């Protein structure tokens, strides 16, 4: 820690956010890269560590709170968004983050996730998507591609996979983005934008499980021709030399085209109030085996649940005065047993 410009404020460093716990993931796991990116980004928040909370559910990603020198909770399978909602609404002074995996968030935790997003609770949700259940040894997950063969589906999965970005947009999330574990610069910029957003923010992070699903995202990790980088206000082009682009069809879906120039190409607008454009972009690639959008799909303003609830409480107090719990419990119909 160091003094910040002589004003007496303590400037935290990456080292200050590293706990004394041994990091225990499989060697080569993508979680290491994400942890390093988050730890190096945390000082940018300008908050003391006791004002930051990481909440996780169950799974490999759920170890995260142990490795960050902040407050944290390793909670219940799929319930991290619900617990984070309670904390965010009761302690609006805190920066509340959820770390979850594709199984934790989209299987048993599916309802908790979509309701936190639709309510626009002031939480930041990092969804690590490795398209597999890693902690329980390689069963197919809600994002595993159709036909995935593993221990739980030796003849191939019959379940059509979720697209996490599409789900978040369908739930009317006000901030939705996607990044990749190996691109620290891009991931850090997305984290920066998510942190500054007022309301719910979901960031899907493609995360490699090198033991049970190695190479799932190679098509977009190393090959720039398959990364469709979304930049607000710019025509959507991609390819090694920007030779391809995205156009909008008459039916509202997107198509990939050769792009000699910017004429007719779709211009990305992350602030579009209606989420139709962002949703159409999310459907370009259901699973990342070809050209796939990366970046911020949507960033719009909407009243935040925490503030709306606080407003109701303030109104009730001003109109009725401080509540009396004993009177409340004995009001209306009561019974003596």
Image (cartoon, rainbow, N blue to C red):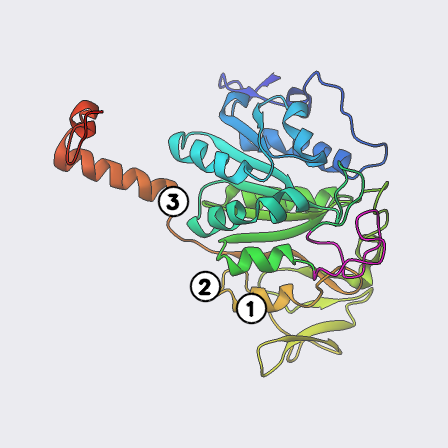
Q: Which mark is residue 305?
A: 3
Position of residue 25 measured from the top left corner of the image (x, y, whole percent): 79, 30
**What secondary structure predominates along the stretch shown in magenta?**
loop
Asked if residue 327 can be seen in this view, the reply is yes
Q: Which residue is nearer to you in this view: 179 or 279?
A: 279
- Which secondary structure lies at badge 2? loop
Q: Residue at x 66, y 23 (%)?
A: 66
Q: In this view, does 270 lie to the left or right of 237?
A: left
Q: Which mark is residue 273?
A: 2
Residue density around tag 1, few if under 14, some if 14–19, many if 20 or more, within 10 Å? many
Q: Which residue is nearer to you in this view: 219 or 232?
A: 219
* Residue to which mark 1 is pinned: 277
> How many marks on residues?
3
Q: Which residue lies furthest to the bottom in this view?
A: 250
- Which secondary structure lies at badge 3? helix
Q: In this view, does 109 lie to the left or right of 181?
A: left
Mark toward the start of the polypeptide (3 vs 1):
1
Position of residue 17 measured from the top left corner of the image (x, y, whole percent): 64, 23
Give the CA separation, mark 3 to mark 1.
25 Å
Range of residues picked out in magenta: 142-160
Q: Which residue is drawn at 52% across and 22% down?
A: 48
**Which quadrant is the N terminus positioned in?**
top right
Give the CA separation, mark 2 to mark 1.
10 Å
The quadrant holding residue 45 is top right
């Amino acid at each position: 820690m160091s003094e910040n410009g002589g004003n007496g404020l303590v400037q935290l460093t990456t080292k200050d956010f590293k706990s004394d716990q041994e990091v225990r993931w499989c060697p080569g796991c993508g979680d290491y890269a994400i942890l390093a990116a988050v730890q190096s980004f945390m000082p940018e928040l300008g908050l003391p560590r006791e004002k930051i909370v990481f909440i996780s559910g169950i799974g490999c990603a759920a170890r995260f709170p142990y490795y960050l020198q902040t407050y944290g909770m390793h909670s219940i399978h799929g319930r991290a968004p619900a617990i984070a909602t309670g904390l965010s609404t009761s302690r609006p002074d805190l920066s509340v983050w959820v770390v979850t995996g594709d199984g934790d968030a989209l299987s048993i935790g599916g309802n908790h996730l979509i309701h936190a997003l639709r309510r626009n609770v002031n939480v930041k949700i990092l969804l690590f998507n490795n398209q597999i259940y890693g902690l329980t040894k390689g069963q197919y997950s809600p994002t595993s591609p159709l036909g995935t063969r593993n221990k739980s589906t030796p003849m191939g999965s019959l379940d059509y996979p979720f697209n996490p970005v599409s789900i978040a947009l369908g739930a009317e999330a006000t901030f939705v983005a996607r990044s990749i574990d190996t691109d620290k610069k891009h991931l850090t910029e997305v984290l920066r934008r998510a942190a500054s957003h007022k309301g719910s923010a979901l960031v899907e992070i493609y995360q490699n499980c090198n033991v049970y699903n190695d190479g799932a995202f190679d098509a977009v990790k190393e090959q720039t021709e398959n990364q469709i980088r979304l930049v607000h206000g710019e025509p959507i082009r991609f390819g090694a030399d920007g030779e391809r682009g995205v156009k909008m069809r008459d039916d509202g879906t997107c198509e990939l085209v050769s792009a000699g120039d910017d004429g007719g190409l779709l211009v990305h607008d992350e602030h579009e109030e209606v989420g139709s454009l962002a949703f159409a972009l999310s459907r370009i690639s259901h699973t990342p085996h070809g050209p796939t959008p990366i970046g911020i799909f949507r960033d719009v303003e909407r009243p935040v649940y925490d503030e709306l609830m606080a407003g109701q409480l303030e109104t009730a107090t001003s109109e009725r005065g401080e509540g009396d719990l004993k009177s409340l419990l004995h009001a209306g119909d009561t019974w003596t047993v």
